[in-house]
């Protein structure tokens, strides 16, 4: 049973465009929803995160939109840049249970 | 460097040998998580440990795999009698407490089984 489903698997965007990655979860006990960015050969690093008491969080060019009733959340990257080319993972965590469950990742390529 | 330290970064083993992967969490962090990443796939949870305790090992294969986090020293992920299917990147992450959100990841240990 895959608890966090992520789409698309890969995404190609022109420089300056908007990149949108979507995730859906099943477990209503999840209470923390982060997005991680991973460059080749490196470990994942936290990009931005949201808790279910808000519907949107913005940090610079990165925005998380959260729909609690639909059990979905998405990452929007505005004004996408070639340096944003990486693999992005959504995750969900029940902070009382410890572990985080990850989506399968989206490989983003931003063309110059 | 106060980040999560993993070693070795690259490890090559022949089938049947043992692999030991080490992880030193960030300073002040007492919770460690191990994840496995197969090529072109996501991060799969393996085990969650506190000092001297295994909290959740629901993602660990039942045989050949074990993990520990002793009172002193790094956390160790041990794979006995490795097979080709064990070839993957193994990531360690740490947190200050078990109920804080952010995981801090190391750069991973890439195991290749010949």
Image (tube, coloured by chain):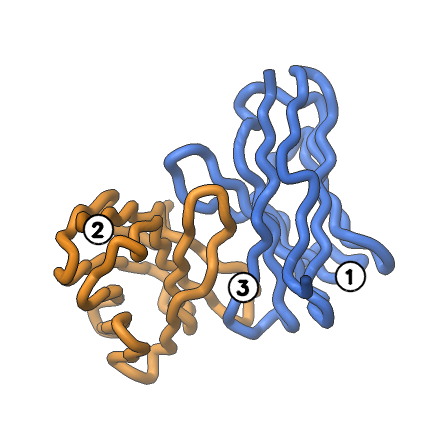
| SS of the residue under disc 1 | loop
Instruction: Work out whether A101 lies above or below A77.
Output: above
Residue B15, position as x, y percentages in the image: 65, 15
Chain that bears disc 2: A
Residue picked out by circle 3: B103
Write down the colour of chain B. blue
Identity of the residue furthest to the bottom in this view: A53
Same chain for mark 2 and mark 1? The answer is: no
Q: CA distance from mark 3 to mark 2?
A: 26 Å
Viewer-side residue, B76 vs B104:
B104
Please state which of the two labelled residues, at mark 3 or mark 2, is closer to the viewer. 2
Instruction: Work out whether A40 lies above or below B82.
Output: below
Residue picked out by circle 2: A110
Mark drawn on residue B51:
1
Screen quadrant of the N terminus of chain B: bottom right
Please state which of the two labelled residues, at mark 3 or mark 1, is closer to the viewer. 3
Residue A99, position as x, y percentages in the image: 54, 59
| SS of the residue under disc 2 | strand
Viewer-side residue, A83 vs B30:
A83
Residue B6, position as x, y percentages in the image: 67, 48
Same chain for mark 3 and mark 1? The answer is: yes
């Amino acid at each position: 049973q895959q608890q966090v489903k992520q789409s698309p698997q890969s995404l190609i965007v022109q420089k300056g465009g908007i990149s949108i990655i979507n995730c859906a979860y099943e477990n209503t006990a999840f209470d923390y929803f982060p997005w991680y960015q991973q460059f080749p050969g490196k470990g994942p690093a936290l990009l931005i995160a949201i808790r279910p008491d808000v519907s949107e969080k913005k940090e610079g060019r990165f925005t998380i939109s959260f729909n609690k009733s639909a059990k979905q959340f998405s990452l929007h990257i505005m004004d996408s840049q070639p340096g944003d080319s990486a693999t992005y993972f959504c995750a969900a965590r029940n902070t009382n249970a410890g572990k985080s469950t990850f989506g399968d990742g989206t490989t983003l390529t931003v063309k110059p | 460097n106060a980040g999560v330290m993993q070693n070795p970064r690259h490890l090559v083993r022949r089938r049947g040998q043992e692999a030991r992967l080490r992880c030193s969490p960030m300073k002040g962090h007492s919770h460690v998580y191990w994840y496995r990443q197969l090529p072109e796939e996501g991060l799969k949870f393996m085990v969650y440990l506190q000092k001297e305790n295994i909290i959740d090992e629901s993602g660990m294969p039942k045989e050949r795999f074990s993990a520990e986090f002793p009172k002193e020293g790094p956390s160790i992920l041990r794979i006995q009698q490795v097979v080709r299917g064990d070839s993957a990147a193994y990531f360690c992450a740490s947190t200050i407490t078990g109920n804080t959100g952010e995981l801090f990841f190391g750069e991973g240990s890439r195991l290749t089984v010949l």
